[in-house]
Image (cartoon, grey):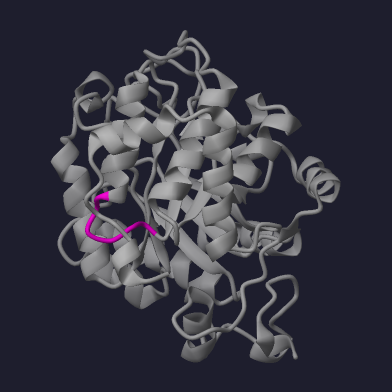
Amino acid sequence: MPEAAIRHDWTRDEVAALFALPFNELLHRAHTVHREHHDPDAVQVSTLLSIKTGGCPEDCAYCPQAARYDTGVQAQKLLEVDEVLARAKAAKAAGASRFCMGAAWRGPKDRDIPKVAAIVSAVKGLGLETCATLGLLGEGHAQQLRDAGLDYYNHNIDTAPEFYGEIIHTREYQDRLHTLEQVRDAGLKTCCGGIVGMGETRAQRAGLLQALANLPEHPQSVPINQLVPVPGTPLGDAEPLDPFEFVRSIAVARILMPLSIVRLSAGRQQMDDAVQALCFHAGAGSIFYGEKLLTTGNPDVEHDRALFRRLDLHPLEIVEEAGTAHADILEAGHPDMDQASCGQGCGCSAAA
C-alpha cells in the first residue's frame, strides 16, 4: 500500500462516520481493504499462556487478576522455563505460529527480566514467534527482551483517552503510550488494541480506534477484545455489547489500519459461530487458539478447527520473507533450534 495511503491523522468525526455506515456497506468496505492487503482465507493463530498469574496491584475494572478483587484467582509465581517450554511445544503441535506470554505485574522489576528473557529465548528456539505482555517497562527492559529473542510486545491502550479514567486509576494513559514508545524504539513489533463492551459509548469506541490508528506507527497486531464480565470485578455485571456492534468495531479497525493484523481476541467464547464468521469477513485475521486466555475461557482447539473447515479458512503460514519476525528467527540461527526440522506446522521455508 502506498505510504501516503496509511494515515495517522484520522479525526473523531471520520471514525464516527465509519461506525455510522449501513452495516452491509461497512462490511463491504472493510472486506475490500482486507482482500487488498491480506489473504482473506488465512487466519494467524496464536496461543496465550499466563506465565505469572494473579496478585496484580493495578485496579483495572475488567481484570480478575487484580489482587484487590475477589474473583477466585490465586496469585502464583513465575513459571519455570521447562513448564513454559512444554506448553509452547504443545501449542506449536496444535498449529499455533506465535506463542504469547502474559504476566500479572504492574511492570517487571529489573530482577524479573533475566528470568523472562530465559523463557523467551527457549520458546523462540522452537521456531515460534514470541510475544510478551508484562505491563509497564522500565529503562532498558525492551532492549533486553529484544536481545533474548522477543518479536512482539503487547501493551493495550484499553479504551478511548476520555473514558480511560472510568476503568483504571492506578496508571495513567500516558504511561501506556510511554511503554509503547520504548517498545518501538527497541525495534520490537507492537501488539496493541483495546476492549469494547465496558459501558463506553459508540463515540468512545471510535475514540479507541482513532487513538490506535493515530499512533506514530500502526501496531502490527491489533487485538480487539470483547469484555468478559468476571464476577467480583467492578464490571462483573456489565451489559453485553450487541454482537453486530462488535463486528462494526472489527470492520472500522480494519479500514483505519490496513496493514495491521486485526485479532479477534477475548470474548470469543461468548460469540456464536455466525458472529465469528462475520468478524473474519470484516477483516479479523488472527485468533487466540486454546482453551484459556490468561484466566478466562476460550473456544477449544477442536472447535476452532471445525469452524475453520466450515468457513474454508486455514491457519496463516509464516513464510521466510525479509523483514518478518519469523525470518529473524531463522537468520539468527538460534542454538536451540534445529533448522533442518523447522516447518512442523510453522510453515517456514526451512522445511523444504
Residue 215 seen: yes
- Depth check: 318 or 60 in front? 318
Q: Is residue 322 left or right of residue 293?
A: left
Residue under the point 33% across and 68% down: 188
Specify the principal SS of the magenta part.
loop
Residue under the point 48% across and 86% down: 322
Q: Is residue 143 above or below residue 315?
A: below
Q: How many marks?
A: 0
- Depth check: 272 or 99 in front? 272
Q: Position of residue 87 (x, y in %)?
A: 64, 56
In the image, the segment drawn in magenta is 214-219
Residue under the point 81% across and 53% down: 312
Residue 266 seen: no
Q: Is-magenta flag for residue 87?
A: no
- Depth check: 181 or 250 in front? 250
Q: What is the quadrant of the N terminus in the image? A: bottom left
Q: Is-magenta flag for residue 218?
A: yes
Q: Where is residue 79 in the image (x, y as percent from the top left)?
A: 50, 52
**Quarter location, residue 293:** top right
Q: In this view, does 196 lie above or below 125?
A: above
Residue under the point 75% across and 91% down: 352
- Depth check: 250 or 315 in front? 250
Q: Position of residue 333 (x, y in %)?
A: 52, 90
Q: Is residue 312 left or right of residue 110?
A: right
Q: Is residue 306 left or right of residue 337?
A: right
**Quarter location, residue 316:** bottom right
Q: Where is residue 5 in the image (x, y as percent from the top left)?
A: 34, 63
